Amino acid sequence: MGKNKGGIPDAIKEIIDNLKEDDFDDDIEEENKDIVSVIEPVLLYGAGVWGGALTVEQINRLHTIQRVFLLKLLRPYRTTATQALSVLSGIPPLHLKANYEYLKFQIWSCRSRGLAGTIELNNLDHYLLLSDIPLDVRVLNLPERLDDNIFEVYTDESKIAGGVEFSVCILNKENQQKTICHKLEPNNTVFQAELSADWAIQNNTKINIFTDSKSSIDALKSHRTKSNFIKSIKNKFRLAETLVGLTWVKAHAGIPGNELADQFAELATTNGELMNLPLPYSYLKLQLKRLLLQSWNDCYTEYQSASVTRVRVYVPRVDEKNVNF
């Protein structure tokens, strides 16, 4: 890819030069989405490799490129500093976004020990190649309901004071047979049905599981799921394939078993045993987003220019709710 005199790749400069003000409508929120979803991926292609070692010259080049889009988007005074434009638009500086992509790739995909201080690697889930997951685990044949079951199982989760609690209630003809209560870390993904499948295998008993977590059912039935943690759960369901039926029920719909599970989930706040599970990809992205916001705020509050100083009077810090990722 050729470069012009200013160091901007020719292909990118051609895109910038061809932009007209008419290409940007009055809906800034929609334009932000276009920049984040279309333009940023082009500019940050491969940032997982190069985004962690940017020179001052490279950072300035990214600022120059981003400034053109921000000026066309916000239509401010031409003298407004790029730092101020980024904060007003909610679009992070490209060098910080590049570093975000770098850390995400190095920690999640490469498990870089040099970054172990950023995120505890041992607690993270990881992705597998789909070709490495046996077909009978990837594609589960889970019926919604077994007709000759003896037990019914209801699951529920509760999020109170930043924590996650869940319960599994096993009933035999509406009589309480067994209850399992656990607490989890706030960022854990809850798959209560896993414990139900374990119980069915251990007791060689047919059960119908009723859960209000549609996302859990979707993850278990998806043949594209790469998570090692979910793969381990799917394997348990494979072993219990003839013993388990799995059905979604609406939360708080007055179903006695579901209401009972809800009560025990709330009690797990004080009585539940802590259960350690791998942290999902979403947890890593959340932590890295917080690091990016912290770095962005540091850059913004330390930057000295007349326009940034004026903006800081009204916007003292980066508004997390306004950030476009």
Image (cartoon, helix red, strand yellow):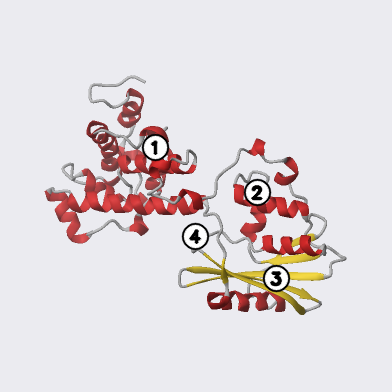
Q: Amino acid at mark 1?
A: Ile
Q: Amino acid at mark 3?
A: Tyr
Mark 3, residue position = 154
Q: Residue 189's x, y, as percent?
A: 56, 59
317 left or right of 102 in image: left
256 left or right of 265 in image: right
Q: Is residue 56 above or below residue 237?
A: above
Q: Amino acid at mark 2?
A: Lys
SS label for mark 1: helix
Labelled pair 3, 2 in contact (Cβ < 8 Å) = no
Residue 231's disc is 2
Q: Residue 292's x, y, as percent?
A: 34, 49
Q: Residue 317's x, y, as percent?
A: 25, 58
Please report whichever mark, 3 or 4, sits nearer to the chain's N-terminal start.
Answer: 3
In three-dimensional space, the C-alpha distance between marks 3 and 2, rounded to whole angstroms, equals 22 Å
In three-dimensional space, the C-alpha distance between marks 2 and 1, rounded to whole angstroms, equals 34 Å
Q: Residue 232's x, y, as percent?
A: 66, 51
Image point 57% across, 64% down: which residue? 275
Q: Amino acid at mark 4?
A: Asn
Mark 4, residue position = 187
Nearest to the eye among marks 1 and 4: give it: 4
SS label for mark 2: helix
SS label for mark 4: loop
Mark 1, residue position = 39
Please report whichever mark, 3 or 2, sits nearer to the chain's N-terminal start.
Answer: 3
66 left or right of 239 in image: left
In three-dimensional space, the C-alpha distance between marks 3 and 4, rounded to whole angstroms, equals 22 Å
Please report whichever mark, 1 or 4, sits nearer to the chain's N-terminal start.
Answer: 1
Please report whichever mark, 2 or 1, sits nearer to the chain's N-terminal start.
Answer: 1
* Residue toward you, 107 or 44: 107
